[in-house]
Image (spheres, rainbow, N blue to C red):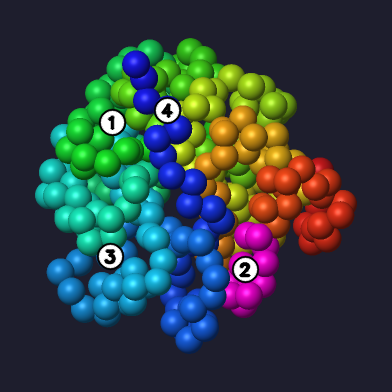
Amino acid sequence: MGRNNKNIPNLGIGLGLRIPHYEDIFRDKPNVDWFEIISENFMVDGGKPLENLHRILEYYPVVQHGVALAIGSPDPFDFDYLKKLKALSRITKTPWISDHLCWGKLAGAHFHDLLPLPYTKEVIDYVSERARIVQDYLEVPFALENLSSYVAFKADEMPEWEFYSAIVEKADIYMMLDVNNIYVSSRNHGYPPQDYIRNIPMERVLQIHLAGHSDRGDYVLDTHDNYVCDEVWKLYAEVYPQTGGVSTLLEWDANFISFQETWEEALKAKDFQKGIESKNIGLKVPCAR
């Protein structure tokens, strides 16, 4: 029997843990359900990062989200990296670990970017086997996140949602579903975002990401530096019930606003979970067209 998210805890509404908000968090201990950390920022032997992490762990659940696994890269697995990742998970007691469905490494080079993969059967076989190994090694549920995409490969044999679904099913892992990325990609490639959400196994989703983006008219950039826009909230309202209710996180990574304003933005998710229409919530950013 395949995995499903019924065995995964719903932590509620969370925020990405970011340095500009440390002072407010440590001083006020706000009533946030949980925090998500960028794993690589804490994969160190000691010092201030781990000191701050332990302070957070005294009061909040913490979930690990990575940016450097680059699972679709052609280079052999870096088991030193996986060893450090697993060691950190023993400290955080994270209920799952996620990273991105991308590539970004070659022998002797790390591009430090989330680069898209060709949507082919060959890549499905390659990535799913590596994802299975990662989950078995880490000994916690492992999820891959969908990217924002801006170009397509001529070699593509299928749409992204079919590619993504096939990998998680074949590897028997989970989806870390970024609703903003679905919207961004749908705008950039000209398809209805509902085509995406209608064709993925929602029972595989263990967490949702929300974020703001930058609309440049002809294309949309996933910048995590703005309020979540109206149409992304509406997509979230469609997706969330289909998952059966999973943990939701707001990412905000540049042009920071105050901690309180960031938390208030995240809390809008509760209204959409209850089915309240967007016009009643006081949204600040309509999606430009």
The picture places residue 224, in percent across and down from the top left corner, at 58, 57
Tag shown at residue 66: none
Residue beneath disc 2: 262
Q: Residue at x 29, y 73 (%)?
A: 54
Residue beneath disc 3: 42
Residue beneath disc 4: 4
Q: Please report whichever mark, 1 or 4, sits nearer to the chain's N-terminal start.
A: 4
Kind of residue sitting beneath label 2: Thr
In-front residue for pair 65/256: 65
In this rendering, position of residue 229 left or right of residue 132: right
Residue with the most extreme right position: 279
Q: CA distance from mark 1 to mark 2?
A: 33 Å
In-front residue for pair 255/75: 255
Question: Within 10 angstroms of label 3, few (less than 14), some, or many (20 or more) residues?
Answer: many
Kind of residue sitting beneath label 4: Asn
How many numbered marks, from 0 up?
4
In this rendering, the answer to whether 101 lies above or below 214 is above
Question: Within 10 angstroms of label 2, few (less than 14), some, or many (20 or more) residues?
Answer: some
Q: CA distance from mark 3 to mark 4?
A: 29 Å
Question: Within 10 angstroms of label 4, few (less than 14), some, or many (20 or more) residues?
Answer: some
Answer whether residue 260 is magenta in the image. Answer: yes
Classify mark 3: helix, strand or loop. Answer: helix
Q: CA distance from mark 1 to mark 4?
A: 16 Å
Question: Marks 4 and 2: which is nearer the front?
Answer: 4
Residue beneath disc 1: 131
